[in-house]
Every structure is written in C-alpha cells, then in structure tokens.
Amino acid sequence: MKISILKVKNMHLGLTSLTVIGVGLSYGISPNKVLPFFFDFKVESVDLNNVFRAIMGLYIGLAIYWLIGIFKPEHWWNATLISSIFMGGLAFGRIISILIDGIPSAPFSIGSALEISYMILGVFNLTTQKFLIFNS
C-alpha cells in the first residue's frame, strides 16, 4: 500500500513538471517561430522575445523544484503546495478570461482543463498526505 500511495503522491509533481517544462520550452526556445504556429499572434520585437524567454525560465525553474520534491521527501509538501497554487492561479486567470472574453481556442481550453485538474490533484494529495501524517 505504501508504494501505491507514493506513486500517486509523486505522479502529480511528475506530470506538472513535464507539462510545464514542455510549455516553457515551447514559449522560449524560439518564440518568434513557435508561437505564431500555435497562436494567432506574431512575436516580432526583442522585448517580446525577452518576455517569453523569461516565462520559459520561470516555468523551468518551478518545474525543477517540483522534480526535487519527488526525489527529496523533505521538499515534497512545499513543492506540491507551490505547484497547486501555480496551477490554481493559471486556472483562475483562464476562468476570468472565459467569463470576460469567451471560450478560447482548443489549445487554451485543453490548457485550462489540465491546470484545473492538476490543481485538484495537488490539493487532493496535500489533503491525503496531511491525513496520513496525522493519523499514522
């Protein structure tokens, strides 16, 4: 039973890390070539390239900490909490945008669903682990 709890517990951090690293790389490796392919805008200025590369760095930095949380149990709680807050913040912004701007394109809708799912899974893991810690 302990192994299955450990797998579910760490699955959240693994999934969010891989997703955020992938999104970060897509934003930052070559924003002027990659982003117009997926989205309805062009990245034509040095400043806009800089912004997307900074976002890439932020995403990768957070994902690295989440991966540390998998391999170093003393960081698991904080990594999961930060991941849940991050995903919840993204989901909150997307929900506000949906209410104000309408339904976005498929990639953004899928992103919204993933962010909400990752937030729920993170909160579930935090709640479950807290219960296991205090009742063991």
Image: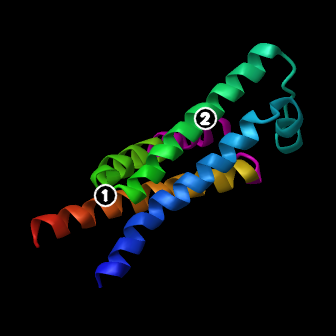
Relative horizontal placement of residue 26, taking residue 133 as reference (left or right): right
Is 93 colored magenta in this rendering?
yes
Q: Amino acid at mark 1?
A: Pro
Would you identify the image quadrant in which residue 25 lies?
A: top right
Find residue 100 and name its label.
2
Residue at image point 86% right, 29% down: 32
Q: Amino acid at mark 2?
A: Ile
Vertical placement of 29 versus 116: above or below?
above
Q: Give percent across and percent down for residue 76.
A: 33, 54
Q: Give percent across and percent down for residue 51.
A: 68, 22
- What is the quadrant of the N terminus in the image? bottom left
Under tag 1, what secondary structure? helix
Would you identify the image quadrant in which residue 72 lies?
A: bottom left
By secondary structure, the bulk of the magenta-drawn segment is best described as: helix
Specify start and end residues of the magenta stretch as a single range: 88-106
In the rendered structure, which disc, 2 or 1, sits on the residue that comes first in sequence? 1
Residue at image point 45% right, 44% down: 65
Residue for badge 1:
73
Q: Residue furthest bottom?
A: 1
Give the total number of marks visible in the rendering.
Answer: 2
Sort mark 2 into few (<14), some (14-19) or many (20+) by Cα contacts within 10 Å.
few
Residue at image point 54% right, 52% down: 17
Residue at image point 61% right, 35% down: 100
- What is the quadrant of the C terminus in the image? bottom left
Kindly report which numbered mark, 2 or 1, lies closer to the viewer in this rendering. Answer: 1
